[in-house]
Image (cartoon, rainbow, N blue to C red):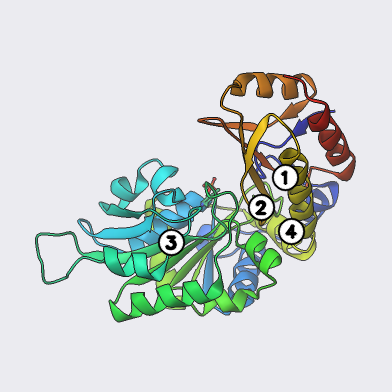
C-alpha cells in the first residue's frame, strides 16, 4: 500500500470526476467563449455573494494578481510571517508588484486586528513605504490548518476600512475552514475585497483556482492574468473538475478532519513524539523528541509505504485528503503505534 500524506495536493481525479471532465462543453476561454469556465466562475462568485470570479491555473497566480490589483510599486502589504504569499510564491510580491512585506509575528499563521493596526505606516511620513493591503490566510498552511474566528476577521476589516487598506483572503483551504467552523461562504464574501480559492487542494481537482471580487476589479484582474501569462484556451475540461468537486467533495472534508484528529490523538500517546500541535482541519504537525533523528522516522515510515513531510527542526507534517481512505487510515494508526526507533 502506498500512502501519501505529504500534501492534500497529491490527489488524482476520481473516475467520476474524469467522466464529468470528458463530457464538458468547451470553447476558447481567452475569447471568453468557454461555457464551462463561465459556469464555474458564476457559480463560485455567487456562492460567496461576490459579483464576479476569474479562473486561474494556480493559487499563486490568483494571489499574485490580487496583490497587483491592490498595490503600486514601492508600497507595502501586511501579512503573517508564515504567509504563503511571502514564503512560497517565489518572491512574486517583489517581482510582479514591486511591493515589500511587513510581517507580523502571529499565532499559527494568524494575525490580529491589533497587530495589523500597529504595522500600518503613517501615510504622512513619506520616508516609509505606504501600506496599502492586508493579506490573511484561512486555513493557514504553515500554521497547521488553523482557522480564524470570524469576529477577528471583522475586526481586521474595520482596521482596513479606517485606514483605506484593501483586504485579501488567501483562501486556498477556505473550504476546510468553512466545514470545520460551520461557516457560510457569504460571511467571507462580505468581508474581503478579493478572495482566492483553490480547487486542487482538499477538493481533489487536478488544477484550478479562482479569484473573486466585484465585477470592475475582475475586469482589471483579467488584464493582469494575461500579463502573467495565464490566459487559457479550452479549459472547460479543467473547470468541469472544479464544478464536480464543488458538488461532491466539500462535505466529505469532515472525514479528512476526523482522520487528522485521530492521527493526532494516536501521535500524542507515543513516547517518541514530544508535541502535537492543535488540529482544527486536515493538517497534523508534530515534533519528535530532540534526541531522535527526523530521518529515522521518515525512513521507518517509508519502508512501511507511508510518505510524510519533514519540516526541519524536528517537526513533521501529515495532511489528510480525498485519496487517504479509511483502510489506509487504520493501517497508518497501527503502524504509528508499532514504530520502534
Ligand atoms: C497551496 C496554497 C496556495 C496556492 O498554491 P498553488 O500551488 O499555486 O495552487 C496559496 N496559498 C496557500 C495558503 C496555499 O496553501
| Label 2–label 1 contact, CB within 8 A | yes
Q: Is residue 151 left or right of residue 47?
A: left
The spot of residue 245 in percent (x, y) is 74, 58
The spot of residue 274 in percent (x, y) is 63, 35
Residue 111's disc is 3
Tell me which residue sits at (79%, 43%) in the image: 323
Tell me which residue sits at (62%, 40%) in the image: 275
State which quarter of the image contains the C terminus: top right
**Which is nearer the N-term, disc 4 or disc 2?**
4
Between marks 3 and 1 in the image, the one whose residue lies nearer the viewer: 1
The spot of residue 204 in percent (x, y) is 71, 50
Between marks 4 and 2 in the image, the one whose residue lies nearer the viewer: 2
**Which is nearer the N-term, disc 2 or disc 3?**
3
Q: Is residue 244 left or right of residue 176?
A: right
Residue at numbered disc 4: 245
Q: Secondary structure at mark 4?
A: helix
Between marks 3 and 4 in the image, the one whose residue lies nearer the viewer: 3
Q: CA distance from mark 2 to mark 1?
A: 7 Å
Q: Quadrant of residue 116?
A: bottom left
Q: CA distance from mark 4 to mark 1?
A: 27 Å
Q: Is residue 198 left or right of residue 190?
A: right
Local crowd size for mark 1, using a 10 Å CA cut-off: few (<14), some (14–19), many (≥20): many
| Label 4–label 1 contact, CB within 8 A | no
Local crowd size for mark 3, using a 10 Å CA cut-off: few (<14), some (14–19), many (≥20): many
Local crowd size for mark 2, using a 10 Å CA cut-off: few (<14), some (14–19), many (≥20): many
Q: CA distance from mark 2 to mark 3?
A: 18 Å
Q: Which residue is more in the foreground, 18 or 33?
A: 18
Residue at numbered disc 2: 279
Relative to 261, does residue 223 appear above or below in the rendering?
A: below
State which quarter of the image contains the N terminus: top right
Amino acid at each position: 500500500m502506498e500512502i501519501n500524506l505529504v500534501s492534500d495536493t497529491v490527489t488524482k481525479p476520481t473516475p467520476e470526476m474524469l467522466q464529468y471532465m470528458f463530457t464538458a462543453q468547451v470553447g476558447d476561454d481567452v475569447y471568453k467563449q468557454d461555457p464551462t469556465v463561465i459556469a464555474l466562475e458564476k457559480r463560485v462568485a455567487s456562492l460567496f455573494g461576490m459579483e464576479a470570479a476569474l479562473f486561474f491555473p494556480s493559487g499563486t497566480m490568483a494571489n499574485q494578481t490580487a496583490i497587483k490589483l491592490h498595490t503600486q510599486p514601492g508600497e507595502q502589504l501586511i501579512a503573517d510571517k508564515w504567509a504563503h504569499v511571502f514564503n512560497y510564491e517565489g518572491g512574486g510580491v517583489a517581482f510582479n508588484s514591486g511591493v515589500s512585506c511587513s510581517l507580523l509575528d502571529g499565532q499559527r499563521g494568524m494575525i490580529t486586528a491589533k497587530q495589523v493596526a500597529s504595522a500600518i505606516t503613517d501615510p504622512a511620513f513619506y520616508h516609509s513605504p505606504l501600506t496599502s493591503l492586508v493579506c490573511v490566510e484561512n486555513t493557514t498552511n504553515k500554521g497547521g490548518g488553523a482557522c480564524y474566528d470570524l469576529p477577528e476577521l471583522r475586526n481586521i476589516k474595520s482596521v482596513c476600512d479606517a485606514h483605506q487598506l484593501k483586504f485579501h483572503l488567501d483562501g486556498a483551504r477556505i473550504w476546510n475552514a468553512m466545514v470545520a467552523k460551520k461557516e457560510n461562504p457569504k460571511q467571507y464574501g462580505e468581508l474581503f475585497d478579493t478572495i482566492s480559492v483553490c480547487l486542487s487542494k482538499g477538493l481533489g481537482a487536478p488544477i484550478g483556482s479562482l479569484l473573486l471580487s466585484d465585477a470592475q476589479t475582475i475586469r482589471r484582474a483579467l488584464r493582469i492574468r494575461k500579463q502573467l501569462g495565464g490566459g487559457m484556451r479550452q479549459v472547460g475540461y479543467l473547470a468541469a473538475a472544479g464544478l464536480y468537486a464543488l458538488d461532491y467533495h466539500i462535505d466529505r472534508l469532515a472525514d479528512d478532519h476526523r482522520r487528522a484528529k485521530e492521527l493526532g490523538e494516536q501521535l500524542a500517546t507515543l513516547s517518541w513524539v514530544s508535541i502535537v500541535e492543535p488540529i482544527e482541519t486536515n493538517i497534523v504537525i508534530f515534533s519528535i523528541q530532540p534526541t531522535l533523528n527526523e530521518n529515522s522516522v521518515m525512513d521507518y515510515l517509508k519502508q512501511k509505504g507511508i510518505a510524510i513531510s519533514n519540516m526541519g527542526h524536528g517537526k513533521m507534517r501529515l495532511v489528510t485528503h480525498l485519496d487517504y481512505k479509511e483502510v489506509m487510515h487504520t493501517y497508518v494508526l497501527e503502524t504509528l503505534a508499532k514504530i520502534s526507533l
